[in-house]
Amino acid sequence: MIVSLSFAQDSLKTKPDVDPRDLDFNKNQNKGQWYTSLTLQLSSSSAENEDQFIRQLHYQDNGHFEVGVQGGYFIKDFFMTGLEFSYSSSNKNERYSANGEDNHLKSISHGYYIAPFIRNYIPLSKNRRFSIFNQTSLQVGFGTTLKQNETASALTKTKTDRVTLGIGIQPGLAAFIMDGFAFEASVGLLGLEMDHQQSTTNYTEESQRTDFDLNFKVNLLQIKLAVAYYF
């Protein structure tokens, strides 16, 4: 009787809560793990009756939207290969005066790019809650912009098709909030880019332009945030 009562009392005891500081995230970056993440960027700007030195802005309503998805596989501990796909859309609607003439500018842009990448991690703690990483990617992008500028004397319509090739280096920080789930922040550090544009104005005039850009600048205002899942 005493033994059975003791067993009943032990079975009613609840397990103590696990301290979040003691969670172990060591398996998330091991060989054989999969990875996926989602990024979302939204921005908009509006203004009225603003003096912009070279022009007088009467009205402005601009917006930008971008969504990206990444997927990867750890081919060895702390080293992953993967692929990123991104879609972006921008629109612009402005009325302004310049050189004594009123202008109404409207444009819309759509773009896609894919980027195979490699990423290596360096854990900052024994349980790997925090890790820094460096991602190197080869980017291939395609996009189209339609622009219309209307004045009192002319209406100009331009279509521009763009192809972009680039190599980018992107360091960042991964912070696990629970097993498998992490927040990530990264910023572009170095980029080599070739941008080719082909434009047609008023359906007849054609032009081409190719730019090469080697960029060492770090823009802290364009930090890329993502929600990631390791499984």
Image (cartoon, helix red, strand yellow):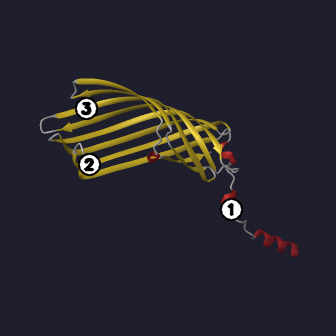
Q: Mark number for residue 158? A: 3
Q: Nearer the viewer, mark 2 or mark 3?
A: 2
Residue 52 coordinates in the image, percent (x, y): 25, 47
Residue carrying label 1: 19
Which amino acid does the dot numbered 1 rest on? Asp
Quadrant in the picture for residue 79:
top right
Please give the name of the residue rendered at 31% of the width and 30% of the height, measured from the top-left corner: 160
What is the CA distance from the residue labelled 1 to the residue labelled 3?
60 Å
Name the residue that disc number 2 marks: 60
List x then y, in percent, for residue 141.
42, 31
Instruction: Identify the secondary structure beneath mark 2.
Output: strand
Q: Please tell me how crowded label 1 is: few (under 14), some (14-19), or many (20+) other residues with Cα within 10 Å.
A: few
- Who comes first in sequence, dot 1 or dot 3? 1
Secondary structure of residue under mark 1 = loop
- Can residue 1 be seen here? no
Q: Are the two marked residues, 1 and 3, in contact with CB atoms closer than 8 angstroms?
A: no
In the picture, which quadrant includes the N terminus?
Answer: bottom right
Q: Residue at x 31, y 24 (%)?
A: 208
Left-right relation of 7 to 196? right
Task: Give the residue type at disc 2.
Answer: Gln
Which of the marked residues, 2 or 3, is nearer the chain's N terminus?
A: 2
